């Protein structure tokens, strides 16, 4: 990949968890990890449980704080190190550049489904109507019945909540998407829809980093596999 | 420098200084009064003395009167507008015994008027002094219980909360229902309590040619409105200040422009309305005005 | 970052405050940016509320600066500002939401009067427009308009708290300080209040400092957190960083002590 299109660049990343409540034992998870992701790529992290796939993904999102190394994110045409960026810069990057889809929806009390999905687009400055229209389009595509749009998703099923989360993640067309088990609890039909969504985004140039356990889905979306081992050393 | 006794003391009660208070106390009071005059509406603390009357009977007004009275003064004392009520009579007699000054019931003839709860109907003129007896000097008292805080509020002109009180009046009653002791701003600066005079009297404070002094004995505060000072009642643009109007006129003198007292005549509910200002009423009747229940003027006497 | 403000709204520098020999705030420094919600968490006695009161000028500080950029773009050190200036700011550009509504409301005055007070203090003297404003704000905080003339003591705890918020926001403050705004409320009432605060803070782009011992509240409201212990900031960072990847032993203890965040 040529350097110009690099969207993520991870360099010499070390991440150790120190558990102070258990006598300060240290659990090294990432050591000297490095790789980059270009636009239009879907890199899938692959390795056994405990290899640090989620840790790496969360570090890229700025959710976990590595001890050393850099994670450069292309934001507004510049490479910004999210490990050392000011909190408000991290928020700004998340608002406009970096999307993150987990299997768990963090439900906000009383906010209706449509607005939860539209929120990222709204936050980027799109109008309310445009944001809601885009949200409606995604919810329709993900087969969430229209009668549910006005309800807060707190009482929805796991699969429904996950699809709402995916809709939210794809609503704003982030240049970079981080996907943590996006299809985990979906049925076959919905999984196909999500795979198509991911593929569409990648074709538009979105750089994607994903964790996917299901081999079929992985095969369907991945353009490059990144193996991680325990105390992950990247290939 | 020794204190000079400049007054004719011959006829006052033996053993007492002119006007009861000793000269140093009067000087202290006069300093407080001067400061009050210099800062219109500002409450000046002073060392309130024990007077031979209980607190609440006008000891603040009496101390102010004692501090400013001279042997040539002509004193008028009124209580609720009347010269002949117990409180007025007692205070007037006290000053006669302590100063031997001339007294009058005529507003026009008085140089010094001590009052409780009214401003005379007849306009005052330059050179006259009106002394108000004040029970509670602090206008913010019921809105902010802390004295330290109310002082700060005065210092910083933070008077918004007083409007909150008036807002509440309108919200609950449809109009500003504060009927006496109406809050005013003096000289565009200090929020002031007018003592419990009816709202009807409030406009009389504004640009009055007389000097108006306020004394609160129990609360140990003196404040003043110098002659020709702006006294502005607080109000809202869409609920401007207005005085009460009533359809009745004085049953004795027929006045339709004075503050009226309601008098119950029997146990069947008959009643009459009469001027609360006895001097004003008498002057009108002397001039031939009559009301619904007029009796011949000369037959009128204090109960 | 091109479109981010270059100067913070509030910048606290090396703030110290002791009560006798007991240090309540030790060398606390932080910045607050426009529209940002900063949560201060820690157990009771950790100095959270002292810090909040010191920032608001309700407590004098022993040393340190509280630099505030006013609407007129002047930088004022609130720790050294005149009381007149400070009090003026507190009722115009700042707001303070108390844990107990009775400390932040005038309980003997109606809801409408409570909302209108700050405006009247600024010299608004039109009863009709004060009332219109009060009605708008009642609606914004989800209180029925026909309650406008009712006393706050006839309101539920959640309503009182919402009224307090309206009373503060009516002058469109740039910073609102909140001391345990949801403390003592039922969980369902809390959720509604939190949602309302979230929405209003976003709509009016107001910066907030929220003191809370409830990490759930912090997660929902705050962009950024500071963890305080014994008067010191032991850890600070993005809310999700701090709660998902706590570094300091005390933060780990706090996070692990919560049933579920």
Image: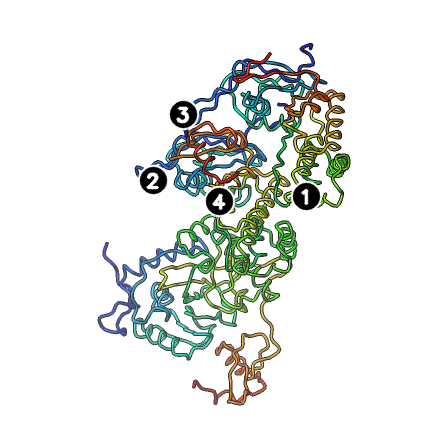
- The residue labelled by disc 1 is A112
**Spatial distance from mark 4 to mark 2, Cα to Cα?**
22 Å
Residue C180 - label: 4
Decide if residue C200 is on the left or right side of residue A192: left
Query: The disc numbered 2 marks a residue on which chain?
Result: C
Q: Which mark is residue A24?
A: 3
Q: CA distance from mark 3 to mark 2?
A: 34 Å
State which chain disc 4 sits on: C
* Of the two numbered discs 4 and 2 in the rendering, the one whose residue sits closer to the viewer: 4
Residue B104 image point, x, y percent: 41, 76
Q: Quadrant of residue C57?
A: top left
Q: Are marks 1 and 3 in contact (CB under 8 Å)?
A: no
Q: In the rendered structure, find residue C19 and report the number of the disc placed on it.
A: 2
Instruction: Give residue C213's position: percent from left, percent from top.
Output: 46, 41
For mark 1, give the secondary structure: loop
Please name the residue shown 69% across and 45% down the image: A151
């Amino acid at each position: 990949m040529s350097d110009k299109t690099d969207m993520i660049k991870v360099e010499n990343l070390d991440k150790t968890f120190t558990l102070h409540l258990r006598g300060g034992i240290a659990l090294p998870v990432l050591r000297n990890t490095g790789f980059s992701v270009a636009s239009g790529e879907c890199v899938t992290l692959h390795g056994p449980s405990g290899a640090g796939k989620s840790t790496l993904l969360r570090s890229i999102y700025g959710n976990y704080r590595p001890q050393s190394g850099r994670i450069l994110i292309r934001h507004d045409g510049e490479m910004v190190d999210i490990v050392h960026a000011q909190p408000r810069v991290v928020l700004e990057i998340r608002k406009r550049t970096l999307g993150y889809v987990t299997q768990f929806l963090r439900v906000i009390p009383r906010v209706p489904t449509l607005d939860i999905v539209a929120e990222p687009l709204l936050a980027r400055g799109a109008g309310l109507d445009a944001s809601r229209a885009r949200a409606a389009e995604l919810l329709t595509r993900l087969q969430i019945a229209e009668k549910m749009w006005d309800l807060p998703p707190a009482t929805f099923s796991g699969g429904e909540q996950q699809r709402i989360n995916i809709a939210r993640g794809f609503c704003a067309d982030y240049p970079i998407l981080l996907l943590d088990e996006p299809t985990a609890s979906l049925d076959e039909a919905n999984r196909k829809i999500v795979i198509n969504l991911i593929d569409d985004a990648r074709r538009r140039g979105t750089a994607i980093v994903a964790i996917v356990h299901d081999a079929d889905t992985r095969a369907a979306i991945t353009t490059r596999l990144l193996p991680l081992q325990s105390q992950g050393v990247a290939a | 420098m020794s204190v000079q006794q400049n007054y004719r003391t011959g006829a006052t009660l033996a053993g007492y200084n002119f006007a009861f208070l000793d000269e140093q106390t009067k000087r202290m009071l006069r300093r407080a009064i001067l400061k009050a005059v210099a800062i219109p509406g500002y409450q000046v603390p002073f060392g309130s003395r024990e007077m031979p009357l209980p607190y609440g009977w006008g000891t603040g007004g009496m101390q102010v009167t004692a501090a400013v009275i001279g042997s040539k003064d002509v004193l008028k004392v009124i209580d609720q507008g009347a010269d002949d009520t117990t409180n007025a009579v007692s205070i007037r007699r006290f000053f006669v015994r302590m100063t031997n000054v001339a007294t009058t019931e005529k507003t026009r003839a008085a140089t010094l008027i001590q009052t409780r709860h009214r401003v005379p109907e007849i306009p005052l003129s330059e050179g006259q002094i009106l002394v108000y007896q004040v029970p509670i000097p602090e206008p913010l008292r019921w809105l902010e219980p802390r004295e330290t805080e109310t002082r700060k509020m005065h210092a910083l002109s933070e008077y918004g909360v007083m409007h909150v009180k008036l807002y509440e009046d309108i919200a609950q009653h449809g109009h500003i229902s504060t009927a006496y002791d109406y809050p005013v701003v003096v000289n565009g600066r200090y929020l002031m309590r007018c003592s419990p005079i009816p709202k009807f009297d409030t406009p009389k404070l504004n640009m009055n040619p007389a000097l108006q002094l306020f004394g609160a004995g129990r609360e140990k505060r003196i404040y003043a409105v110098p002659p020709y000072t702006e006294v502005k009642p607080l109000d809202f643009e869409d609920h401007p200040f207005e005085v009460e109007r009533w359809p009745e006129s004085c049953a004795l003198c027929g006045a339709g422009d004075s503050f009226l007292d309601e008098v119950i005549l029997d146990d069947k509910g008959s009643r009459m309305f009469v001027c609360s200002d006895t001097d004003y009423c008498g002057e009108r009747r002397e001039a031939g005005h009559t009301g619904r229940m007029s009796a011949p003027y000369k037959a009128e006497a204090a109960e | 970052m091109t479109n981010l403000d270059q100067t913070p709204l509030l910048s606290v520098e090396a703030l110290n405050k002791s009560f006798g020999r007991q240090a309540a705030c030790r060398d606390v420094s932080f910045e607050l940016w426009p529209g940002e919600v900063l949560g201060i968490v820690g157990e009771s006695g950790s100095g959270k509320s002292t810090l909040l009161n010191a920032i608001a000028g309700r407590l004098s500080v022993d040393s340190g600066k509280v630099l505030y950029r006013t609407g007129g773009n002047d930088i004022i050190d609130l720790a050294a500002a005149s009381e007149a200036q400070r009090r003026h700011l507190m009722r115009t550009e700042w707001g303070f939401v108390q844990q107990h509504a009775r400390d932040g409301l005038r309980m003997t005055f109606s809801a409408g009067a409570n909302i209108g007070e700050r405006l009247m203090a600024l010299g608004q003297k039109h009863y009709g427009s004060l009332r219109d404003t009060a009605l708008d704000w009642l609606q914004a905080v989800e209180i029925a308009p026909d309650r406008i003339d009712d006393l706050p003591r006839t309101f539920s705890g959640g309503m009182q708290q919402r009224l307090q918020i309206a009373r503060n926001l009516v002058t469109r403050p740039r910073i609102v300080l909140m001391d345990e705004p949801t403390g003592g409320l039922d969980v369902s009432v809390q959720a509604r209040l939190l949602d309302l605060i979230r929405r209003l803070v976003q709509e009016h782009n107001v910066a907030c400092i929220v003191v809370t011992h409830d990490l759930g509240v912090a997660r929902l409201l705050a962009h950024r957190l500071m963890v305080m212990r014994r008067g010191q900031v032991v850890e600070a960072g993005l809310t999700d960083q701090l709660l998902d990847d706590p570094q300091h032993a005390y933060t780990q203890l706090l996070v692990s002590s919560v049933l579920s965040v």
